[in-house]
Amino acid sequence: MPAQPRSLTHDDAASAPRRGRPGYDRETLLAVCVEVFNRHGYDATSMGTLSSHLGISKSAIYHHVASKEEILEQALNRALDSLEEVFDRVQATDSRAVNKLEMIIQGSVRVLVDQMPYVTLLLRLRGNSPVELKALERRRQLTRMVENLVREAQEEGDVRTDISGKSAPRLMLGMVNSIVDWYQPDRSGTVDQLSDTAVKMIFAGLRAM
């Protein structure tokens, strides 16, 4: 007599793999949430929206983070920490101000390419929460560092003095920040080519001499 199939016990059910519920570690969950924020806007994205895109329950999300604001803060910290690392490393050198500016532009381009989703989120902040305001202040501090270097380079005679030391840093960083809107690795060249082009355009211009 053929053996009868054994019925599924409670222990069997507990040990069986669960289908349709993808597992997420904090890193993967953060990446997906940032993608959703950039697509729909942070303010317009609810925990329900994140739950839907992740394919897990809201309670499963809360297993990793305490709130939507915590996800935002972690994402912004990733972008700002990377940018601040570039600035701190450059400022620690004994280079002239103009060379520090070149290194900051090159390093910032690399961060934007490497951390594009996170930097994109940073650049779209509106300052609607304490987390956003704190991030915007950190970003302003970086701008002020560039502003100080431009003025120092002007005093050292390496940057022309007939340009605004206030506007020039913001125009420089604005050009770099625009990368998030159009850069495509398969069409826009390598990161080295991109950073070199940015430096040459800023410090040498386009006109053939």
Image (cartoon, rainbow, N blue to C red):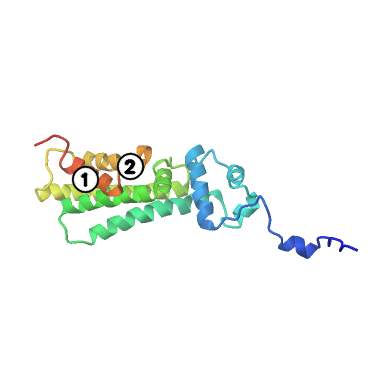
On screen, residue 11 versus residue 175, left or right, reads right
Q: Is residue 91 above or below residue 132?
A: below
Q: Quadrant location of the N terminus?
A: bottom right
Which residue is label 2 attached to? 177
On screen, residue 155 versus residue 40, left or right, reads left
Q: Nearer the viewer, residue 132 or 123?
A: 123
For residue 83, say whether it is visible.
Answer: yes
Q: Is residue 207 above or below residue 190?
A: above
The amino acid type found where label 2 is placed reads: Asn
For residue 70, say whether it is visible.
Answer: no
On screen, residue 185 versus residue 103, left or right, reads right
User: Residue 197 location in percent, x, y?
Assistant: 23, 43
What residue is shown at x 13% (from left), y 47% (from top)? 154
Judged from the image, the secondary structure of the residue bearing numbered disc 2 is helix
Q: Quadrant location of the C terminus?
A: top left
Which residue is at the far front? Answer: 1
On screen, residue 191 versus residue 21, left or right, reads left
User: Residue 161 location in percent, x, y?
Assistant: 11, 41
User: Residue 87 location in percent, x, y?
Assistant: 28, 55
Q: Is residue 17 above or below residue 189?
A: below
User: Residue 108 location in percent, x, y?
Assistant: 30, 50
Crowding around mark 1 (Cα neighbors within 10 Å: few <14, some 14 to 19, many 20+) is: many
Which residue is label 1 attached to? 199
Judged from the image, the secondary structure of the residue bearing numbered disc 1 is helix
The amino acid type found where label 1 is placed reads: Val
Q: Of label 2 and label 1, which has the lower sequence position?
A: 2
Q: Nearer the viewer, residue 204 or 167?
A: 204
Q: Nearer the viewer, residue 190 or 82?
A: 190
The Cα atoms of the two marked residues, 2 and 1, are separated by 14 Å
What residue is shown at x 49% (from left), y 46% (from top)? 34
Crowding around mark 2 (Cα neighbors within 10 Å: few <14, some 14 to 19, many 20+) is: some
